[in-house]
Amino acid sequence: MTIPAPALPEQAPPSTAFRNATILTMDASRRVLHGADLLVVGDSIAAIGVGLEVPPGTFEIDAARGILMPGMIDTHRHMWQTAMRGYGADWTLTQYFVWYYLEHGKQFRPQDVYAGNLLSSLDAIDAGITTTVDWSHGLRTSEHAEAALAALEEAPGRSVLAYGNIFAGPWEWADSEEFKNFATARDRSSETLGFQMAFDVTGDPAFPERRAFEVARDLDLAVTTHAGVWGATNDDGIRLMYENGFMRDDTVYVHAATLSHDSYQRIAATGGSVSLSTESEQSCGQGYPPSWVLREHGIPVSLSVDTSVWFSSDLFAAMRATLGADRSIEHMKAHEVGDTVTHSHLRSEHVVDWATRGGADAVGASDRVGSLEVGKKADVVLVKNDASPSMFPLVNPYGHIALQANRAEVHTVLVNGRIAKYDNELVGTQIHAARKAVEDTVTHLQSVLGEEVWNAGMNPDIPATKILDNPYQYTDYRTSSTHVATEV
Ligand SMILES: [Zn+2]
């Protein structure tokens, strides 16, 4: 029989204790504790140990038969696209570009960006993701940017607004007063809402993106960029960034799938990191998920969802896909030379590390989040569901998180010490507001596109105006290294 969990107190408790957990600390020595407690006081972790004494008024959560881990960190998610969840399930990257970049992305109103962001934020918390980088590249106007921001501020999780706009050249929007005013108005001391710039580098030898990098440098903002995407961004972009001194240790390269060893060495030498979206790389065609080559170059890795217009919106799926892809290529390479892999290089512990500490390092927050240690901010996830047959036995906690667990087993989520999910359900009523907002967005898009276009959009035709050799419609730059220029 399952004993019901005690109800949450009406007032947020001043302290919360998890009792009798298996704890994946993800600290520097990767301690795994059994039958241990973790005490949160205010917004921080106050104590970890067995049989902890706790202050009066502490809300106690029975964590026996569960795994306590740091809140996960998603370093690349186009949150605005969550309003179209699942619509592009059968797309290729080209079809994504056609739909969002060329034809219909401009139909998103500010409230549609808000709707997607709010839903995506709640979705993240529900899945145990406590920090999300919103790779927000649909910000056509300052109203869109304010709407994206409003949703992130209302949502319970930490986020980083990575500001972008695929409908204009980065050198245009980044250099505008509108953007600079928005950027300088951000509270840079906020611990729950960070700010970055998000744009891609096409490899055009004129390097028009230089201006955007200069703005980022002047404002001291990190840049996140899709790099190593087959047919779109490649070694020329990395070389231009390198030669012009714009590769920094806080730069995050998304996908990094089709790059040369020179480019990987440049990333490694300048201290940047790669955000892997393995489900995306496998399905869209950016290139083979590169965890295996990143390991060879010692490049730090974090994990990401990319977009739930296609893919799973939790990092359990990302860990699973990444383990599978990495092991697949190792086996294939071995078989090609008549060999057998007898030991897997990539372990479940590694992908749990990438989903937690790796993300914290990528967003420059490893002093505060990414591990369970006394003094760190209390972003804590309890994976537990006594009613679930897939929750026992718990003999291998890393393996359980990487290959067995799912969001329905995320029992409790704390962000900054506040309980955002409890007893396997989100706390609060924002889900209703998010559902209403997203329904309105879907109705809006269906009405402006019309039924025929809406239905065709799930498997769009490639239009006569060429996009294959240049998804970035704000520039005419194309080359044989982006795509062989055959007329459609
Ligand atoms: Zn992306």
Image (tube, rainbow, N blue to C red):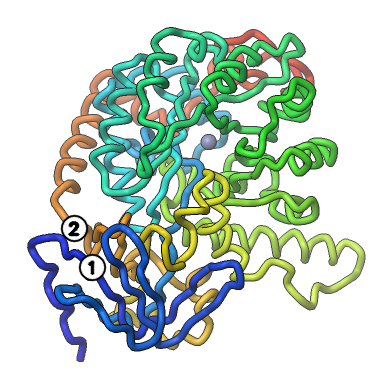
Name the residue at 83% across, 60% down.
Answer: 333
Q: Amino acid at mark 1?
A: Ser
* First along the sequence among labels 1 and 2: 1
Above-or-below relation of 19 to 182: below
- Provide the secondary structure element on which disc 2 rests: loop
Q: Nearer the viewer, residue 63 or 486?
A: 63
Identify the residue under disc 2: 427
Label annotation for residue 72: none
Above-or-below relation of 64 to 478: below
* The furthest residue to the bottom: 1
The quadrant of the picture occupied by the N terminus is bottom left
Q: Quadrant of residue 380?
A: bottom left
59 left or right of 164 in image: left
The quadrant of the picture occupied by the C terminus is top right
Label annotation for residue 15: 1
- Provide the secondary structure element on which disc 1 rests: strand
